[in-house]
Amino acid sequence: MRINWSCGRQLVSAQDWIQIRRVRGFHASTRQLTNSSLPRHQEANKENRSNTDEWTNITSTIERLTDRKLLSNPAHPLSILTDIIFSKFPEQEYTRANFPNPRVSVYENFESLNITSDHVSRSKTDTYYLNKDHVLRTHTSAHQVESFRDHPTPGFLIAADVYRRDEIDKTHYPAFHQMEGGRWWSPQGTSSVKELVAKINQDTAKIPVSEIKIIDDTLPFHDGNPKQHGQHQEVCIAITNHLKRTLEMVVGDIFENIALGDPSAPKEPLQIRWIDATFPFTSPSWEMEVYWQGDWLELFGCGVTQQRVFDRAGYPERVGWAFGLGLERLAMVLFGIPDIRLFWSEDPRFVEQFTPGVVSAFKPFSKYPGTYRDFAFWLKEGTIPEEFHDNDLMDIVREAAVDLVESVKLIDKFTHPHTKRNSLCYRVLFQSMERTLQNDEINVLQDSIRDSLKTKFGVELR
Ligand code: DAH
Protein backbone atom coordinates (compact mmCIF):
# COMPACT_ATOMS: atom_id res chain seq x y z
CA MET A 1 0.00 0.00 0.00
CA ARG A 2 1.23 3.47 -0.76
CA ILE A 3 0.91 5.85 2.14
CA ASN A 4 1.22 9.18 0.47
CA TRP A 5 1.94 11.96 2.85
CA SER A 6 3.74 14.08 0.40
CA CYS A 7 2.91 17.49 -0.84
CA GLY A 8 3.61 16.41 -4.30
CA ARG A 9 5.79 13.95 -5.94
CA GLN A 10 3.89 11.97 -8.48
CA LEU A 11 1.96 12.75 -11.59
CA VAL A 12 -1.47 11.32 -11.10
CA SER A 13 -4.63 10.98 -13.08
CA ALA A 14 -7.78 12.41 -11.56
CA GLN A 15 -8.86 8.93 -10.53
CA ASP A 16 -5.55 8.02 -8.87
CA TRP A 17 -5.67 11.33 -7.20
CA ILE A 18 -8.91 10.44 -5.46
CA GLN A 19 -7.43 7.17 -4.23
CA ILE A 20 -4.25 8.79 -3.05
CA ARG A 21 -6.15 11.37 -1.09
CA ARG A 22 -8.02 8.64 0.72
CA VAL A 23 -4.86 6.97 2.01
CA ARG A 24 -3.02 10.17 2.75
CA GLY A 25 -1.13 9.84 5.97
CA PHE A 26 -1.42 13.21 7.67
CA HIS A 27 -4.83 12.78 9.24
CA ALA A 28 -6.57 15.02 11.63
CA SER A 29 -6.33 12.27 14.23
CA THR A 30 -2.64 12.97 14.70
CA ARG A 31 -2.01 13.38 18.39
CA GLN A 32 -0.20 16.51 19.48
CA LEU A 33 2.99 16.25 21.47
CA THR A 34 2.41 17.20 25.05
CA ASN A 35 5.97 18.36 25.54
CA SER A 36 6.28 21.53 23.53
CA SER A 37 10.04 21.76 23.56
CA LEU A 38 12.11 18.62 23.19
CA PRO A 39 15.71 18.69 24.40
CA ARG A 40 18.01 20.45 21.98
CA HIS A 41 20.56 17.63 22.16
CA GLN A 42 18.15 15.39 20.25
CA GLU A 43 18.46 17.74 17.36
CA ALA A 44 22.17 18.30 17.58
CA ASN A 45 23.26 14.76 18.31
CA LYS A 46 24.81 13.90 14.96
CA GLU A 47 27.73 11.77 16.15
CA ASN A 48 25.99 8.45 16.26
CA ARG A 49 24.41 8.67 12.82
CA SER A 50 26.60 5.85 11.55
CA ASN A 51 25.75 3.32 14.29
CA THR A 52 23.50 0.53 13.13
CA ASP A 53 20.85 -1.30 15.14
CA GLU A 54 17.63 -3.25 14.64
CA TRP A 55 16.06 -0.15 13.02
CA THR A 56 18.65 0.12 10.24
CA ASN A 57 17.04 -0.48 6.86
CA ILE A 58 19.05 1.76 4.54
CA THR A 59 20.54 -0.17 1.64
CA SER A 60 23.82 0.46 -0.18
CA THR A 61 21.96 1.56 -3.34
CA ILE A 62 20.21 4.29 -1.40
CA GLU A 63 23.43 5.16 0.38
CA ARG A 64 25.03 5.77 -3.03
CA LEU A 65 22.18 8.05 -4.10
CA THR A 66 22.91 10.30 -1.14
CA ASP A 67 26.29 11.08 -2.74
CA ARG A 68 24.93 12.11 -6.12
CA LYS A 69 24.05 15.73 -5.20
CA LEU A 70 22.06 16.43 -8.35
CA LEU A 71 21.31 19.99 -7.23
CA SER A 72 24.97 20.93 -7.30
CA ASN A 73 24.93 20.77 -11.12
CA PRO A 74 23.42 24.08 -12.34
CA ALA A 75 22.54 22.52 -15.72
CA HIS A 76 20.40 19.78 -14.16
CA PRO A 77 16.66 20.32 -14.77
CA LEU A 78 16.01 20.15 -11.01
CA SER A 79 18.53 22.93 -10.40
CA ILE A 80 17.16 24.99 -13.26
CA LEU A 81 13.69 24.73 -11.73
CA THR A 82 15.02 25.49 -8.24
CA ASP A 83 16.77 28.61 -9.48
CA ILE A 84 13.64 29.78 -11.27
CA ILE A 85 11.54 29.39 -8.14
CA PHE A 86 14.22 31.04 -5.98
CA SER A 87 14.26 34.01 -8.35
CA LYS A 88 10.59 34.73 -7.56
CA PHE A 89 11.41 35.43 -3.90
CA PRO A 90 13.22 38.67 -2.97
CA GLU A 91 16.70 37.81 -1.68
CA GLN A 92 16.65 40.40 1.08
CA GLU A 93 13.54 38.73 2.51
CA TYR A 94 14.24 35.00 1.95
CA THR A 95 17.57 33.34 2.84
CA ARG A 96 18.50 30.44 0.55
CA ALA A 97 19.59 27.71 2.97
CA ASN A 98 21.65 24.71 2.05
CA PHE A 99 21.44 21.38 3.85
CA PRO A 100 23.67 19.01 1.89
CA ASN A 101 23.53 16.15 4.38
CA PRO A 102 20.24 14.23 4.23
CA ARG A 103 20.97 12.37 7.50
CA VAL A 104 18.87 13.93 10.23
CA SER A 105 17.61 12.97 13.65
CA VAL A 106 14.19 11.48 14.31
CA TYR A 107 13.59 14.63 16.34
CA GLU A 108 14.27 16.90 13.35
CA ASN A 109 12.34 14.84 10.83
CA PHE A 110 9.32 14.03 12.98
CA GLU A 111 9.10 15.17 16.57
CA SER A 112 10.02 18.82 16.00
CA LEU A 113 7.05 18.89 13.60
CA ASN A 114 4.50 17.28 15.96
CA ILE A 115 4.67 13.98 14.06
CA THR A 116 4.20 11.53 16.92
CA SER A 117 5.68 8.06 17.23
CA ASP A 118 2.39 6.39 16.27
CA HIS A 119 2.20 8.27 12.97
CA VAL A 120 2.18 6.01 9.93
CA SER A 121 4.88 7.98 8.12
CA ARG A 122 7.38 6.95 10.82
CA SER A 123 7.08 3.23 10.09
CA LYS A 124 10.07 1.28 8.84
CA THR A 125 8.20 0.38 5.68
CA ASP A 126 7.99 4.08 4.70
CA THR A 127 11.20 5.61 6.00
CA TYR A 128 14.89 4.79 5.68
CA TYR A 129 16.30 4.51 9.17
CA LEU A 130 20.06 4.80 9.73
CA ASN A 131 19.36 3.64 13.27
CA LYS A 132 16.66 4.16 15.87
CA ASP A 133 17.46 7.87 16.31
CA HIS A 134 18.41 8.89 12.75
CA VAL A 135 16.77 8.75 9.34
CA LEU A 136 17.33 9.92 5.81
CA ARG A 137 15.10 12.99 5.83
CA THR A 138 11.72 12.17 4.32
CA HIS A 139 10.96 15.85 3.69
CA THR A 140 12.68 19.22 3.74
CA SER A 141 10.39 20.22 6.61
CA ALA A 142 13.00 18.46 8.78
CA HIS A 143 14.91 21.76 8.67
CA GLN A 144 12.02 24.06 9.58
CA VAL A 145 12.85 24.56 13.23
CA GLU A 146 16.49 25.45 12.64
CA SER A 147 15.54 27.63 9.67
CA PHE A 148 12.98 29.57 11.68
CA ARG A 149 15.64 29.88 14.39
CA ASP A 150 18.82 30.75 12.53
CA HIS A 151 18.31 33.03 9.55
CA PRO A 152 18.75 36.78 9.55
CA THR A 153 15.79 37.30 7.21
CA PRO A 154 12.11 36.67 7.99
CA GLY A 155 11.88 34.10 5.20
CA PHE A 156 13.85 31.07 4.04
CA LEU A 157 13.95 28.66 1.11
CA ILE A 158 15.52 25.20 1.08
CA ALA A 159 15.95 22.83 -1.86
CA ALA A 160 17.28 19.37 -1.04
CA ASP A 161 17.16 15.63 -1.67
CA VAL A 162 14.72 13.56 0.40
CA TYR A 163 14.16 9.79 0.69
CA ARG A 164 11.16 7.51 1.12
CA ARG A 165 10.73 3.80 0.71
CA ASP A 166 8.36 3.56 -2.20
CA GLU A 167 7.30 1.54 -5.17
CA ILE A 168 9.16 1.75 -8.49
CA ASP A 169 7.51 3.13 -11.57
CA LYS A 170 7.79 6.07 -13.96
CA THR A 171 6.76 8.56 -11.30
CA HIS A 172 8.18 7.07 -8.10
CA TYR A 173 11.75 6.82 -7.01
CA PRO A 174 13.07 6.33 -3.46
CA ALA A 175 15.06 9.55 -3.68
CA PHE A 176 13.57 12.82 -4.86
CA HIS A 177 13.79 16.54 -4.18
CA GLN A 178 11.67 19.07 -2.38
CA MET A 179 11.62 22.76 -1.78
CA GLU A 180 10.60 24.18 1.56
CA GLY A 181 9.73 27.78 2.24
CA GLY A 182 8.84 29.67 5.38
CA ARG A 183 8.03 33.23 6.41
CA TRP A 184 7.50 34.73 9.86
CA TRP A 185 6.42 38.00 11.48
CA SER A 186 7.12 39.19 14.96
CA PRO A 187 4.70 41.28 17.00
CA GLN A 188 7.70 43.19 18.36
CA GLY A 189 7.36 46.86 17.56
CA THR A 190 3.60 46.57 17.23
CA SER A 191 1.32 47.49 20.07
CA SER A 192 -1.83 45.65 19.02
CA VAL A 193 -3.16 42.80 16.94
CA LYS A 194 -4.39 45.43 14.51
CA GLU A 195 -0.86 46.72 13.95
CA LEU A 196 0.53 43.23 13.44
CA VAL A 197 -2.21 42.51 10.91
CA ALA A 198 -1.47 45.80 9.15
CA LYS A 199 2.23 44.89 8.96
CA ILE A 200 1.46 41.50 7.36
CA ASN A 201 -1.06 43.07 4.98
CA GLN A 202 1.50 45.65 3.88
CA ASP A 203 3.85 42.84 2.91
CA THR A 204 1.05 41.08 1.06
CA ALA A 205 0.28 44.22 -0.92
CA LYS A 206 3.85 44.17 -2.29
CA ILE A 207 3.39 40.76 -3.96
CA PRO A 208 2.34 41.05 -7.60
CA VAL A 209 -1.18 39.75 -8.21
CA SER A 210 -1.18 36.79 -10.55
CA GLU A 211 -3.28 36.73 -13.71
CA ILE A 212 -4.17 33.08 -13.29
CA LYS A 213 -7.68 31.77 -12.69
CA ILE A 214 -8.01 30.84 -9.04
CA ILE A 215 -10.68 28.52 -7.68
CA ASP A 216 -10.82 28.91 -3.93
CA ASP A 217 -13.86 27.48 -2.18
CA THR A 218 -12.01 27.02 1.08
CA LEU A 219 -12.97 28.89 4.23
CA PRO A 220 -10.28 30.84 6.10
CA PHE A 221 -10.71 28.20 8.83
CA HIS A 222 -13.42 25.92 10.16
CA ASP A 223 -13.81 22.99 12.55
CA GLY A 224 -12.22 20.55 10.10
CA ASN A 225 -9.31 22.90 9.33
CA PRO A 226 -9.08 25.01 12.45
CA LYS A 227 -7.28 28.15 13.34
CA GLN A 228 -4.86 27.63 16.21
CA HIS A 229 -6.11 28.06 19.68
CA GLY A 230 -4.79 31.36 20.96
CA GLN A 231 -4.11 32.85 17.54
CA HIS A 232 -6.22 35.86 16.69
CA GLN A 233 -8.45 35.14 13.70
CA GLU A 234 -7.39 38.28 11.85
CA VAL A 235 -3.74 37.30 12.23
CA CYS A 236 -4.52 33.84 10.87
CA ILE A 237 -6.35 35.33 7.89
CA ALA A 238 -3.59 37.86 7.17
CA ILE A 239 -0.92 35.12 7.19
CA THR A 240 -3.07 32.98 4.92
CA ASN A 241 -3.54 35.81 2.43
CA HIS A 242 0.21 36.40 2.28
CA LEU A 243 0.86 32.67 1.82
CA LYS A 244 -1.72 32.20 -0.90
CA ARG A 245 -0.76 35.34 -2.80
CA THR A 246 2.92 34.28 -2.69
CA LEU A 247 2.34 30.79 -4.04
CA GLU A 248 -0.12 31.99 -6.69
CA MET A 249 2.48 34.47 -7.93
CA VAL A 250 5.18 31.76 -8.09
CA VAL A 251 3.00 29.28 -9.98
CA GLY A 252 1.61 31.92 -12.34
CA ASP A 253 5.14 33.01 -13.29
CA ILE A 254 6.49 29.49 -13.71
CA PHE A 255 3.71 28.30 -15.94
CA GLU A 256 4.00 31.44 -18.04
CA ASN A 257 7.56 30.29 -18.58
CA ILE A 258 6.72 26.90 -20.01
CA ALA A 259 4.16 28.27 -22.32
CA LEU A 260 7.19 30.04 -23.82
CA GLY A 261 9.10 26.75 -23.99
CA ASP A 262 6.32 25.14 -25.98
CA PRO A 263 4.89 27.63 -28.51
CA SER A 264 2.19 25.15 -29.55
CA ALA A 265 0.78 25.04 -26.00
CA PRO A 266 -2.70 26.60 -25.94
CA LYS A 267 -2.72 30.04 -24.40
CA GLU A 268 -5.55 29.45 -21.97
CA PRO A 269 -5.47 31.16 -18.61
CA LEU A 270 -3.84 28.89 -16.09
CA GLN A 271 -6.23 27.45 -13.50
CA ILE A 272 -5.29 26.60 -9.96
CA ARG A 273 -7.39 25.54 -7.00
CA TRP A 274 -7.02 25.53 -3.25
CA ILE A 275 -8.22 22.61 -1.16
CA ASP A 276 -8.16 21.86 2.55
CA ALA A 277 -5.41 19.58 3.84
CA THR A 278 -4.00 18.35 7.14
CA PHE A 279 -0.38 18.45 8.28
CA PRO A 280 0.77 18.06 11.88
CA PHE A 281 2.92 21.18 11.63
CA THR A 282 0.40 23.64 10.17
CA SER A 283 -3.14 24.70 10.99
CA PRO A 284 -5.11 25.62 8.99
CA SER A 285 -3.50 23.78 6.04
CA TRP A 286 -4.05 23.63 2.27
CA GLU A 287 -2.86 22.13 -0.94
CA MET A 288 -2.60 23.98 -4.18
CA GLU A 289 -3.30 22.14 -7.42
CA VAL A 290 -2.83 23.28 -10.96
CA TYR A 291 -4.91 22.14 -13.93
CA TRP A 292 -2.48 20.86 -16.47
CA GLN A 293 -3.24 18.91 -19.65
CA GLY A 294 -6.54 17.55 -18.41
CA ASP A 295 -5.62 16.68 -14.83
CA TRP A 296 -5.34 18.38 -11.48
CA LEU A 297 -1.73 18.20 -10.41
CA GLU A 298 -0.95 18.62 -6.74
CA LEU A 299 1.88 21.10 -6.20
CA PHE A 300 2.17 22.69 -2.79
CA GLY A 301 1.32 21.55 0.71
CA CYS A 302 1.23 24.54 3.03
CA GLY A 303 -0.37 26.26 5.95
CA VAL A 304 -0.12 28.52 8.96
CA THR A 305 2.82 27.23 11.01
CA GLN A 306 1.95 25.61 14.32
CA GLN A 307 3.07 27.73 17.25
CA ARG A 308 4.90 24.73 18.69
CA VAL A 309 7.33 24.90 15.77
CA PHE A 310 8.10 28.52 16.68
CA ASP A 311 8.34 27.53 20.36
CA ARG A 312 10.98 24.96 19.46
CA ALA A 313 12.85 27.50 17.36
CA GLY A 314 13.03 29.66 20.47
CA TYR A 315 10.66 32.38 19.19
CA PRO A 316 7.27 31.62 20.72
CA GLU A 317 5.99 35.11 19.90
CA ARG A 318 6.41 34.74 16.14
CA VAL A 319 3.70 33.78 13.66
CA GLY A 320 4.05 32.68 10.05
CA TRP A 321 3.57 30.16 7.28
CA ALA A 322 5.43 27.34 5.53
CA PHE A 323 5.11 25.37 2.31
CA GLY A 324 6.61 22.26 0.71
CA LEU A 325 6.82 21.44 -2.98
CA GLY A 326 7.92 18.28 -4.80
CA LEU A 327 10.39 19.32 -7.49
CA GLU A 328 10.45 16.23 -9.74
CA ARG A 329 6.76 16.33 -10.48
CA LEU A 330 6.89 19.94 -11.54
CA ALA A 331 10.13 19.47 -13.51
CA MET A 332 8.59 16.50 -15.36
CA VAL A 333 5.75 18.75 -16.48
CA LEU A 334 7.86 21.78 -17.33
CA PHE A 335 10.60 19.96 -19.23
CA GLY A 336 8.36 17.17 -20.56
CA ILE A 337 10.50 14.50 -18.85
CA PRO A 338 8.53 11.23 -19.03
CA ASP A 339 10.33 9.07 -16.46
CA ILE A 340 11.54 10.05 -13.02
CA ARG A 341 14.61 7.81 -13.30
CA LEU A 342 15.95 10.05 -16.04
CA PHE A 343 16.82 12.67 -13.42
CA TRP A 344 19.46 10.23 -12.13
CA SER A 345 20.77 9.28 -15.56
CA GLU A 346 24.43 9.87 -16.32
CA ASP A 347 23.87 9.31 -20.01
CA PRO A 348 25.32 12.29 -21.94
CA ARG A 349 22.20 12.27 -24.13
CA PHE A 350 20.31 13.37 -21.03
CA VAL A 351 22.92 15.29 -19.08
CA GLU A 352 24.07 17.45 -21.97
CA GLN A 353 20.58 18.51 -23.09
CA PHE A 354 20.02 21.28 -20.58
CA THR A 355 21.37 24.79 -20.04
CA PRO A 356 21.38 26.69 -16.75
CA GLY A 357 18.51 29.16 -16.54
CA VAL A 358 16.57 27.72 -19.49
CA VAL A 359 13.44 25.57 -19.49
CA SER A 360 13.74 23.51 -22.67
CA ALA A 361 11.61 20.60 -23.86
CA PHE A 362 13.23 17.21 -23.23
CA LYS A 363 14.31 15.52 -26.47
CA PRO A 364 13.62 11.81 -26.06
CA PHE A 365 16.31 9.39 -27.07
CA SER A 366 15.61 5.87 -28.22
CA LYS A 367 14.10 3.60 -25.65
CA TYR A 368 15.67 0.19 -25.33
CA PRO A 369 13.50 -2.94 -25.24
CA GLY A 370 12.44 -4.27 -21.85
CA THR A 371 12.03 -7.81 -20.54
CA TYR A 372 9.45 -9.08 -18.03
CA ARG A 373 10.25 -11.69 -15.39
CA ASP A 374 7.78 -13.05 -12.83
CA PHE A 375 8.63 -13.90 -9.25
CA ALA A 376 6.09 -16.27 -7.71
CA PHE A 377 6.51 -17.63 -4.21
CA TRP A 378 4.78 -19.18 -1.22
CA LEU A 379 5.04 -17.12 1.93
CA LYS A 380 6.31 -18.85 5.06
CA GLU A 381 3.55 -20.87 6.68
CA GLY A 382 1.37 -18.72 8.91
CA THR A 383 2.31 -15.47 7.09
CA ILE A 384 -0.52 -13.47 5.62
CA PRO A 385 0.08 -11.48 2.40
CA GLU A 386 -0.29 -8.18 4.28
CA GLU A 387 2.81 -9.02 6.32
CA PHE A 388 4.92 -9.00 3.18
CA HIS A 389 5.16 -5.35 2.23
CA ASP A 390 5.60 -4.35 -1.43
CA ASN A 391 8.45 -2.10 -0.35
CA ASP A 392 10.34 -5.12 1.00
CA LEU A 393 10.47 -6.50 -2.51
CA MET A 394 11.23 -3.07 -3.98
CA ASP A 395 14.36 -2.78 -1.92
CA ILE A 396 15.55 -6.28 -2.84
CA VAL A 397 14.95 -5.56 -6.53
CA ARG A 398 16.62 -2.20 -6.35
CA GLU A 399 19.58 -3.63 -4.48
CA ALA A 400 20.12 -6.26 -7.18
CA ALA A 401 19.28 -4.26 -10.26
CA VAL A 402 19.78 -0.62 -9.25
CA ASP A 403 18.30 1.43 -12.12
CA LEU A 404 17.62 -1.44 -14.51
CA VAL A 405 14.07 -1.87 -13.29
CA GLU A 406 11.25 0.01 -14.92
CA SER A 407 8.44 -1.29 -12.72
CA VAL A 408 7.39 -3.91 -10.17
CA LYS A 409 3.75 -4.97 -9.90
CA LEU A 410 1.87 -7.48 -7.77
CA ILE A 411 -0.04 -9.48 -10.37
CA ASP A 412 -1.44 -12.39 -8.39
CA LYS A 413 -2.25 -13.33 -4.82
CA PHE A 414 -4.06 -16.46 -3.63
CA THR A 415 -4.50 -18.88 -0.75
CA HIS A 416 -4.11 -22.60 -1.39
CA PRO A 417 -7.54 -24.17 -0.69
CA HIS A 418 -6.12 -27.14 1.27
CA THR A 419 -2.80 -26.09 2.79
CA LYS A 420 -4.02 -22.50 3.38
CA ARG A 421 -0.56 -21.21 2.42
CA ASN A 422 -0.46 -17.85 0.71
CA SER A 423 1.17 -17.20 -2.63
CA LEU A 424 2.22 -13.93 -4.24
CA CYS A 425 3.41 -13.22 -7.75
CA TYR A 426 5.21 -10.02 -8.76
CA ARG A 427 6.03 -9.03 -12.35
CA VAL A 428 9.24 -7.07 -12.81
CA LEU A 429 10.05 -5.16 -15.99
CA PHE A 430 13.79 -4.90 -16.53
CA GLN A 431 14.77 -2.04 -18.81
CA SER A 432 17.71 0.23 -19.18
CA MET A 433 17.48 3.86 -20.19
CA GLU A 434 20.93 3.55 -21.74
CA ARG A 435 21.32 0.21 -23.54
CA THR A 436 19.71 -3.11 -24.48
CA LEU A 437 19.94 -5.59 -21.62
CA GLN A 438 21.20 -9.08 -22.48
CA ASN A 439 19.30 -12.16 -21.33
CA ASP A 440 22.32 -13.52 -19.46
CA GLU A 441 22.58 -10.30 -17.54
CA ILE A 442 18.91 -10.42 -16.56
CA ASN A 443 19.26 -14.06 -15.49
CA VAL A 444 21.97 -13.05 -13.03
CA LEU A 445 19.78 -10.28 -11.62
CA GLN A 446 16.85 -12.64 -11.41
CA ASP A 447 18.89 -15.24 -9.48
CA SER A 448 20.13 -12.65 -7.08
CA ILE A 449 16.59 -11.40 -6.39
CA ARG A 450 15.35 -14.96 -5.88
CA ASP A 451 18.22 -15.67 -3.46
CA SER A 452 17.48 -12.56 -1.40
CA LEU A 453 13.79 -13.40 -1.26
CA LYS A 454 14.69 -16.82 0.15
CA THR A 455 17.27 -15.65 2.66
CA LYS A 456 15.56 -12.47 3.84
CA PHE A 457 11.94 -13.63 3.91
CA GLY A 458 12.19 -17.44 3.97
CA VAL A 459 9.78 -17.74 1.05
CA GLU A 460 9.51 -20.84 -1.11
CA LEU A 461 9.94 -19.95 -4.78
CA ARG A 462 7.56 -21.57 -7.22
N1 DAH B 1 6.53 18.19 4.31
C1 DAH B 1 5.27 17.96 3.66
C2 DAH B 1 5.38 16.69 2.82
O1 DAH B 1 6.44 16.29 2.46
C3 DAH B 1 4.89 19.14 2.80
C4 DAH B 1 4.56 20.38 3.56
C5 DAH B 1 3.26 20.64 3.93
C6 DAH B 1 5.56 21.25 3.92
C7 DAH B 1 2.93 21.76 4.64
C8 DAH B 1 5.24 22.40 4.64
C9 DAH B 1 3.92 22.64 4.99
O2 DAH B 1 6.16 23.28 5.02
O3 DAH B 1 3.65 23.75 5.70
O4 DAH B 1 4.38 16.14 2.51
Image (spheres, rainbow, N blue to C red):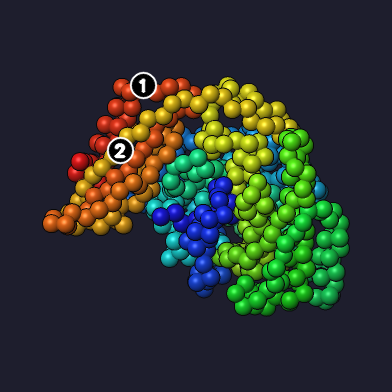
Which image quarter has ligand 1? bottom right
- Tag 2: residue type? Asp
Instruction: Tell me the quarter of the image containing the C terminus.
Output: top left
Where residue 249 appears, as percent x and y from the top left, is 78, 52
Residue 296 is marked as none
The residue under the point 74% across, 45% down is 255
- Report how many numbered discs are placed on residues in the image: 2
Compared across the picture, whether 31 is left or right of 89 comes to left
Q: In front here: 144 or 395? A: 395
Q: Is the residue marked by circle 1 packed among few (<14), some (14-19), or many (20+) residues within 10 Å?
A: few
The residue under the point 51% across, 51% down is 138
User: Secondary structure beneath disc 1?
Assistant: loop
Q: Which residue is mark 2?
A: 374
Instruction: Tell me the quarter of the image containing the N terminus.
Output: bottom left
Q: Which residue is mark 1?
A: 438
The residue under the point 32% across, 34% down is 373
- Tag 1: residue type? Gln
Question: Does residue 359 appear in this view?
Answer: yes
Cβ atoms under marks 2 and 1 closer than 8 Å: no
Where residue 78 appears, as percent x and y from the top left, is 63, 37
Rendered position, 73 above or below 138: above
Q: Is the residue marked by circle 2 packed among few (<14), some (14-19), or many (20+) residues within 10 Å?
A: some
Rendered position, 4 above or below 338: below
Rendered position, 287 above or below 58: below
Where residue 5 appears, as percent x and y from the top left, is 52, 57
| Disc 2 residue lies near ligand 1 with CB under 8 A | no
User: Secondary structure beneath disc 2?
Assistant: strand
Q: CA distance from mark 2 to mark 1?
A: 17 Å
- Sequence-first disc among 2 and 1: 2
Q: In front here: 442 or 327? A: 442
